[in-house]
Image (cartoon, coloured by chain):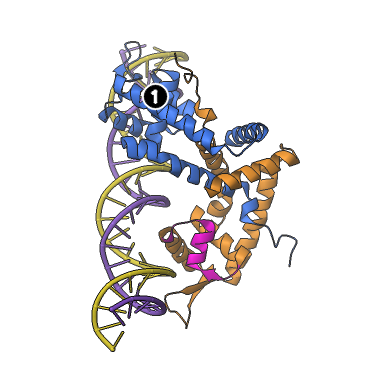
Chain colours: A blue, B orange, C yellow, D purple
Amino acid sequence: MTIFSDYNLEDFTPYLLNMASETTSLAFQQYYKDGYGMLRTEWRVLFHLGRYGPQHAKDVCRRARIHKTKVSRAVSALEQKRYLRRSEEERDRRHELLKLTPSGTSVFKDLRSAAQRFDTELLADFTTSERAVLQRCLLRLAEL
Amino acid sequence: MTIFSDYNLEDFTPYLLNMASETTSLAFQQYYKDGYGMLRTEWRVLFHLGRYGPQHAKDVCRRARIHKTKVSRAVSALEQKRYLRRSEEERDRRHELLKLTPSGTSVFKDLRSAAQRFDTELLADFTTSERAVLQRCLLRLAEL
DNA sequence: AAAATATAGTTGGTTTTGTAACTAACAAGG
DNA sequence: CCTTGTTAGTTACAAAACCAACTATATTTT
């Protein structure tokens, strides 16, 4: 009919990204959800605290690009699970430093290695150069 | 400390996929949300009906990989907006055929070309071969 | 044909998210 | 100081997603 008549949703990058994201995220949630009763945002906040050390909620927001209300709720949940502690700063009592407990640290280590294995498995069929292109493109698309 | 100590969330494909997906989906929603007051699921259902012709809700679920409850609600919303009609089948009255109205078809055409332009823009900085790799990888990852 | 099973789609109640308004603490200018 | 503005984080309410149970119709089994 028109020159567009066979344009396919599978040519639409946001759609492909969404499907790939859903599929892989759902597959990985067995580790943090089934294993530790965590939500996706909680696992991400935990990861950032484990990976980059004690920091403020604000830093987590910036690095992980998660909205502050989501971070706030995830922090409360992680605190209730005793995976992190908050401590007020003397200098500026608006800030609170977030720090993993030993228990939170051990969960982090477990999930980090699960994530690494999962990712290796996920990309097993791709060549090194394909992996590099994929990562580069995704980083670029996430920036916008 | 350990050989894993610098494993980064930016090396974790599901995380990258999620960020790229969120960023691009949010950017595109201006077209269907601001333009036509549609939700993401509604736009996808509309697209599938436009692209693959009249079909049952079940077919939309399968092709678009959207859960039937979400499809059911999207169909109701699209019906209220007069973008589609349902018709019962004689043979099996459990099925209802979903079909875009002329109005729905014109919205579809508009959004389809917006999507095409958007996608072209999105991938403008990548080479042809990078685009091919990206699409192939995403399709593969979405399959799992 | 009656009973059990399966399928298409809907509804209801709970969770989770999103948005905006809010509190509390600090900073800077007058 | 005291107003004005800014920043960190929380809360409230509305929108959306999730899950499980449900209705209605069709199919299979006995």
- Residue A106 image point, x, y percent: 34, 23
Q: Mark 1 points at which residue?
A: A109
Task: Indicate the position of residue A69 as horizontal and vertical percent values.
Answer: 38, 34
In the displayed structure image, the side of residue C27 where residue B85 appears, left or right: right
Say if B71 sits above or below C8 in the image: above
Q: In the figure, A109 relative to C17: above or below?
A: above
* Whether residue B114 is situated above or below residue A95 in the rendered picture: below
In the figure, B4 relative to B49: above or below? above
Q: Tell me the SS state at disc 1.
A: helix
Pick out the residue farthest to the top. A91
- Give percent across and percent down for residue C3: 24, 78
Numbered circles on residues, count: 1
Front-lying residue, B22 or B80: B22
Is residue B67 at all visible to an observer of this figure? Answer: yes
Residue C16, x across and y down, in percent: 36, 43
Quadrant of the frame with the N terminus of chain B: top left
**Residue in the picture at 63% in, 50% down:** A12
Q: What stretch is highlighted in magenta?
A: B53-68
Q: Which class describes the residues within 10 Å of circle 1: few (<14), some (14-19), or many (20+)?
A: some
Q: In this orientation, does residue A65 appear?
A: no
Q: Mark 1 lies on which chain?
A: A
Magenta-colored stretch includes residue B66: yes
Magenta region includes residue A16: no
The front one of A121 and A108 is: A121
| Amino acid at pointer 1 | Lys
Is B45 left or right of A93, judged from the image as shown?
right
Q: Residue at point 48% right, 32% down? A: A117
